[in-house]
Structures are given as structure tokens and as C-alpha cells.
Image (tube, grey):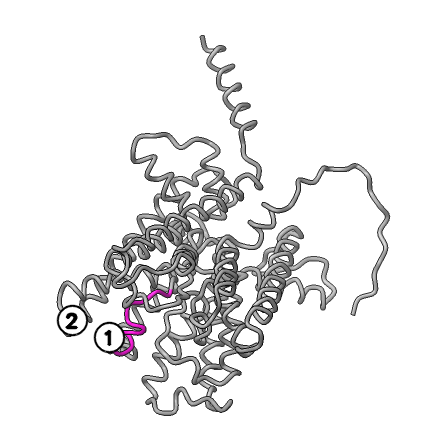
């Protein structure tokens, strides 16, 4: 009897290994899944109940759904004035699903319904979350989802306490929940732009409001792997990925603030009428929001082009991998910087924080940076052709980088784009959310291993 059980376990293990989806299969399922959610969201936003006036066009509904699922925040019209309460709820649901990940949500829901999580679903979770091993990935997913809900509720409660004094209780509660989820998911959607209310309902320079929203953005931009690592730090030391992410977050925030505060030196007029306290709170929040969220509290058109360029670079870098943020990721930039430093110094290994980086990691970072740069450049050139020169090249490039990094900052270009331009921006948002490597794996053909080794020969560089 025991031997039969062992043989059954061996057969089951072989079956699971044979049914293991390849990286291309898993990535393809992610692409199709996100595309279906976007399509369903667009159809729901097209319903008469979703808008306050006339129904929006399918292209505009598709653009908004794509922006919500990819947690970007770019819009072609004011969310508060265009969509009804039902439509706003659909947008909120889409950005929550897009931020957490539909695979994570579906697997947890199936598990709560009593269905076991099979092996290939654990592998799918592994690919979506970006963890190294499938062992324990379900526990990590559940822990992170619980933490996400807790953080969003705490953020909403803190915003509600601040806003309830000047807004009706129901409105303050709804707005606090919406903006807490939007900030934590790094979505950039808001319900004040384009309305008769002042920026952030009059709290656009309020230190309490901006601090809460800024912390939500920062935590959401760290990534599920970092959050889980911090929560379990008592049992083990922080991983190299977590340490790099925390250091890069601090470095980019401080460096960005220094550059933004020097805006007047580059002929910017944004901070001239502000006091020192307002400069400090709004400047720090703008830099924090630039890398990940795109919640706009300042008229970016009044910034100098030098400051706008800094924001563009920060958006392109983005947040951490497997987080609510987009961009090429801070770890990609850190790995390339360390590898370049090692190459300049003539070292055989790229060392960071007493750890050597594998050559595979460096090659992946190079691939991400190359593909991402190519996508941004090609999309900008296509927009120039579509637009026929009516919009400045810099503004078009800013919009493309914002879409690619899923940030949502805008110089007012998106509402003026043609249908073709909006579809192109929607595609860039879709690409940026799934990650360059994911789509590269989907489009790439499987390579056969070969035992043939070719001789090496150097190529002159520089």
C-alpha cells in the first residue's frame, strides 16, 4: 500500500512538471487577461448609467479603462464631471484590480471559495509577483493582499479625519476611499481636476493631506516583494533587492527635491508666489508622485523645461519591480549603474552591498533599458507623425514617458490627441504596465539549445 502511494506521488509530480507552463505561456496569459479586463471595463464605461451626460465614445472608454487597469491616470476628460457614481466605481474597481493583479485576486477568490491552488497557478503567481520561487507564493500573495487592504483603509481613515470638517460626511468618506486607493495603487486618478473645487478640495498645499497621500504612493511603489520582506524581517535579514529598493527610493526622492527646488534658477514661475512651507510640501509631493503616481497638485506647464525634464527622467525610472508603479524600475537603473562602475574600474564582478550581481541579471537589465528606450522613442516619433507638428516635440515625449511609466502626469496633450494618437498612448500604457520583458517573452520564439560553440572576436567600441 505504501509503495503504491509513493508511485502515485511520483506520477503526480511528473504530471505537474510536464504541465508546467513555460515563461512564454504564463506571460501570454497575463497579456490576454489584462486585455480582457480592459475590454470589459470599456464596455461598462460605455453604458448610459456610467456617465453623467451623453455616453462617451468607445475609444475614450477604452482609453480610460486602459489607464485605470494600467494604473496610469491619464484621462481625456474630467473623471468627476464625465462619469457618474457608477462609472467612478467601475474605474476604482479597474485600478484596484490592475494595481494588485488579476491573477492574485482570482487565485485568492478561488481559494476562499474552497478550490485548491494548483501548481501552474502558483507559477503564474510567481511570474506576476516577480518572486524567485513558487514555494510559499500563495502565502505571500494573501499576506500582501491583507496588508494592501489594511493600508488603504488606514489611509482613507486619515484623509477622512482631515476632510470631514469642510465636506459632508458621505462625500468626505467616499472621496477619502477613492483617493486612498488611487494613491496606493499609484493610479493618479482624482475627482477634483476639472471641477469647480480648488485643487484637492482646497487641501492641495495641506501638509497632512499630502503627507498621507505621499506615504501611500511610496509604500505602493515599493512592491509586494519588498513589503513581504519587511514584514518578515525578524526571521531573516533584508534581501539585496529590498535594500537596493529602499536606498534608491531615498536617493531619488532627495535628489529630485533638490532639482525641483531650483526651478526658479531655470526661469520657472511655479514656486514664486509660494511661501517656504508650501514649496516644501508641494515640491516633495510632486517628486514622489512623479516617479509612480502622477497625482497633479501643481500646474506643470508653469515649470521650466529643465524641471519638466527631471520629472520625465524620474517617471522613466519609476518604482520597484512587481509594484503598483511602472517605469524601467529602480533596480534596473541600480544594476546598470553598478555594472558600468565595475566595467570602468576593470573589475571582473559587479559588487553591490557585499553581493556580486549575476551576469544574467545584468543582461536582463540591459534588455529592459534597451527595449523601454526603443518603445518610448518609436512611440514619440509616431505621435509626431500623427499629430503633424501641431504639438511641441517635448510635450509629446513627456506624454509618452508618462504613459509608458504608468505615471499620469500630463502637459495637457492627451485631450488634444486624435483617435489614432489616443490609441497609441493606450498601447504604450498597456506595454508599460505589463513590463518590457513580459511582452518580449511573449513575442520571442523559443530558442533551441545548441552544442555548437563559436570562436570569440572583439568588436571596437566607443
Q: Residues within 10 Å of mark 1 (few under 14, many from 20)?
A: some
Left or right: 348, with 335 as reference point: right
Mark 1 and mark 2 in contact (Cβ < 8 Å)? yes
Note whether 76 is above or below 70 in the view shown.
below
Q: Earlier in the sequence, mark 2 or mark 1?
A: 2
In which quadrant of the rendered image does the C terminus lie?
bottom right
Residue sitting nearer the eye, 38 or 82: 82
SS at circle 1: helix
Residue located beneath label 1 in the image: 201
As drawn, the label of residue 167 is 2
Residue 102 picture location, percent across and down: 40, 46
Residue at 27%, 54% in the rendered image: 150
Task: Tell me where the magenta segment starts and ends, as one range.
Answer: 188-200
For this orientation, the residue located farthest to the top is: 1
Q: Residues within 10 Å of mark 2 (few under 14, many from 20)?
A: some
Note whether 356 is above or below 251 in the view shown.
above
Q: Quadrant of residue 378?
A: bottom right
Residue at 55%, 23% in the rendered image: 14
Q: Quadrant of residue 60?
A: bottom left
Residue sitting nearer the eye, 57 or 448: 57
Amino acid at each position: 500500500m505504501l509503495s503504491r502511494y509513493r508511485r502515485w506521488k511520483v506520477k503526480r509530480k511528473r504530471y505537474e512538471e510536464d504541465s508546467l507552463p513555460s515563461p512564454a505561456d504564463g506571460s501570454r496569459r497575463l497579456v490576454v487577461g489584462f486585455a480582457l479586463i480592459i475590454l470589459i471595463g470599456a464596455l461598462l464605461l460605455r453604458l448610459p448609467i456610467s456617465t453623467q451626460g451623453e455616453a462617451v465614445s468607445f475609444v475614450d472608454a477604452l482609453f480610460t479603462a486602459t489607464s485605470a487597469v494600467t494604473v496610469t491616470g491619464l484621462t481625456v476628460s474630467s473623471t468627476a464631471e464625465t462619469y457618474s457614481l457608477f462609472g467612478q466605481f467601475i474605474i476604482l474597481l479597474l485600478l484596484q484590480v490592475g494595481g494588485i493583479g488579476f491573477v492574485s485576486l482570482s487565485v485568492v477568490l478561488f481559494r476562499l471559495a474552497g478550490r485548491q491552488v494548483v501548481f501552474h497557478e502558483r507559477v503564474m503567481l510567481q511570474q506576476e509577483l516577480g518572486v524567485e520561487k513558487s514555494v510559499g507564493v500563495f502565502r505571500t500573495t494573501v499576506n500582501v493582499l491583507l496588508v494592501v487592504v489594511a493600508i488603504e483603509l488606514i489611509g482613507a481613515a486619515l484623509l477622512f479625519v482631515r476632510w470631514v470638517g469642510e465636506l459632508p460626511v458621505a462625500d468626505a468618506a467616499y472621496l477619502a476611499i477613492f483617493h486612498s486607493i488611487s494613491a496606493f495603487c499609484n493610479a493618479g486618478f482624482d475627482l477634483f481636476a476639472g471641477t469647480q473645487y480648488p485643487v484637492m478640495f482646497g487641501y492641495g498645499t495641506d501638509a497632512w493631506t499630502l503627507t498621507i497621500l505621499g506615504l501611500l504612493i511610496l509604500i505602493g511603489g515599493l512592491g509586494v516583494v519588498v513589503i513581504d520582506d519587511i514584514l518578515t524581517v525578524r526571521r531573516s535579514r533584508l534581501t539585496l533587492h529590498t535594500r537596493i529598493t529602499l536606498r534608491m527610493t531615498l536617493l531619488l526622492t532627495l535628489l529630485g527635491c533638490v532639482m525641483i527646488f531650483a526651478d526658479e534658477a531655470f526661469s520657472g514661475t511655479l514656486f514664486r508666489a509660494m511661501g517656504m512651507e508650501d514649496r516644501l510640501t508641494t515640491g516633495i509631493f510632486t517628486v514622489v508622485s512623479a516617479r509612480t503616481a502622477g497625482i497633479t497638485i501643481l500646474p506643470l506647464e508653469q515649470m521650466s523645461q529643465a524641471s519638466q525634464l527631471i520629472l520625465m527622467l524620474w517617471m522613466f525610472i519609476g518604482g520597484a519591480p512587481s509594484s503598483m508603479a511602472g517605469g524601467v524600475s529602480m533596480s534596473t537603473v541600480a544594476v546598470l549603474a553598478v555594472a558600468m562602475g565595475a566595467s570602468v574600474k576593470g573589475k571582473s564582478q559587479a559588487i553591490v552591498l557585499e553581493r556580486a550581481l549575476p551576469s544574467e541579471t545584468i543582461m536582463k537589465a540591459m534588455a529592459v533599458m534597451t527595449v523601454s528606450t526603443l518603445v518610448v522613442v518609436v512611440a514619440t516619433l509616431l505621435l509626431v507623425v500623427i499629430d503633424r507638428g501641431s504639438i511641441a516635440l517635448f510635450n509629446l515625449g513627456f506624454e509618452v514617458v508618462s504613459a509608458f511609466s504608468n505615471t499620469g502626469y500630463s502637459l495637457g496633450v492627451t485631450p488634444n490627441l486624435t483617435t489614432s494618437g489616443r490609441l497609441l498612448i493606450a498601447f504604450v500604457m498597456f506595454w508599460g504596465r505589463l513590463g518590457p520583458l513580459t511582452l518580449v517573452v511573449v513575442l520571442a520564439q523559443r530558442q533551441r539549445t545548441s552544442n555548437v560553440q563559436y570562436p570569440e572576436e572583439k568588436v571596437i567600441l566607443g
